Image: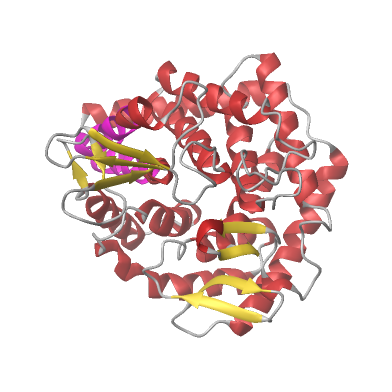
Amino acid sequence: MKRAHLLITLCLLSVLTACSVNKQLKPKSDLVQTIDKNFQDASAQYKVMMKSLPPERFPKTYFPATGKFETSGSGWWCSGFYPGTLLYLYEQTKDQTLLTEAERILKVLEKEQYNKTTHDLGFMMFCSFGNANRINPKPEYKEILINSAKSLASRFDPKVGCIRSWDSEKSDYLVIIDNMMNLELLFWAAKVTGDSSFYNIAITHAETTIKNHFRPDYSSYHVINYNPETGAVQKKRTAQGYADGSAWARGQAWGLYGYTVMYRETKNKRYLEQARHIAEFILNHPNLPADKIPYWDFNAPDVPDALRDASAGSVMASALLELCSYVDKKESAKYFNAAETMITTLSSSQYKAAPGTNGGFILMHSVGHLPQKSEVDVPLTYADYYFVEAMERYKSMSK
């Protein structure tokens, strides 16, 4: 139990650190007002979405050209974002309709606590049940989250030092940078159970990822294929980006957010340095537009005409608003100002959908998997989730 007490102490220290630094950063009052309106508009949008959603299905995307609303089952990696967004919006608006819908869809999702076929249980279960338990703690939520962490941990192999991402050939062991986003669930489980194995798995995965996923400029590959018998790297590639050697924007966002969380949960400066380096790669990149919403890939051949990815911008904004609380004044202001610009841009009519349009989604213009021509220039649930989270983080800094 000493390990659990240590983890709780470290978490409290991270919160105190954030509060002390954030007082030096002053959110713009007009942007806070815009954010409040965004929350109201987003709540209305999600009520539109509810009407199109079959009882056992989760929103996936909407195709403006055809008016087609696409859904998924609870096993899809994005299933946790819909209830998570509803819960964030409920916190801001106190609209009981949103909470009722979140609780309804959580019942559909809860069976995924035993799903051992996916690495995405952090996205699926912590963004949903984690928020539900934070807002209104219940024993059943705690149990679901612990079981989810156990299912996620079952995919860890000490020979490789990573949690397996995609299941494939027996000779392959595929790990994607996205997996950094699922480690927060393990840290939570370590704190509430006192079982240090969850903590150790998260640390080992993060260390192996630092060693193999990143290039000298701190951009990252998307996929590393390990030898499952020896743990040696067999291939480095980028599945959803432009090329193996390119910097797929959302992948860079996952890394930034993931190592920021790693520092919060461990206070190991190694992870803070990693997050800072990733942030500098993103913000100093010559292909990052002035409005700070990245192209779908930093190395897309058709820049500046390449598609933007609102989902990457949303994740980056949320991550930077946390990271700015852990660094010195100069860097803090840089990260804060960049996140502020991202939120401002996403709040404009260029990205924020008009009421009643866009299938009920909040944001337009995200890119899922362009090489496979899947979910290209459409709304996506995780763009909405991290946009709402980023706005909530920004607004909280004004208090």
Task: Judge whether residue 366 can be spotted in this image.
Answer: yes
Q: Position of residue 6 (x, y in %)?
A: 31, 25
Seen in the image, is 257 located left or right of residue 26?
Answer: left
Q: Position of residue 280 (x, y in %)?
A: 61, 23
Q: Nearer the viewer, residue 141 or 294?
A: 294
387, above or below 216, in the image? below
Q: Residue 243: within the magenta?
A: no
Q: Nearer the viewer, residue 346 or 375?
A: 375
Farthest front residue?
301
Name the quarter where the C terminus is drawn: top right
Task: Judge whether residue 23 can be spotted in this image.
Answer: no
- Give the quadrant of residue 283: top right
Q: Magenta region's main secondary structure?
A: helix
The residue positioned 64% from the left and 60% from the top of the image is 89
Residue numbers of the magenta segment:
183-207
Q: Nearer the viewer, residue 13 or 372?
A: 372
Seen in the image, is 267 located left or right of residue 192?
Answer: right
The residue positioned 24% from the left and 28% from the top of the image is 3
- Give the quadrant of residue 228: top left
Q: Nearer the viewer, residue 117 or 175?
A: 175
- Give the quadrant of residue 163: top left
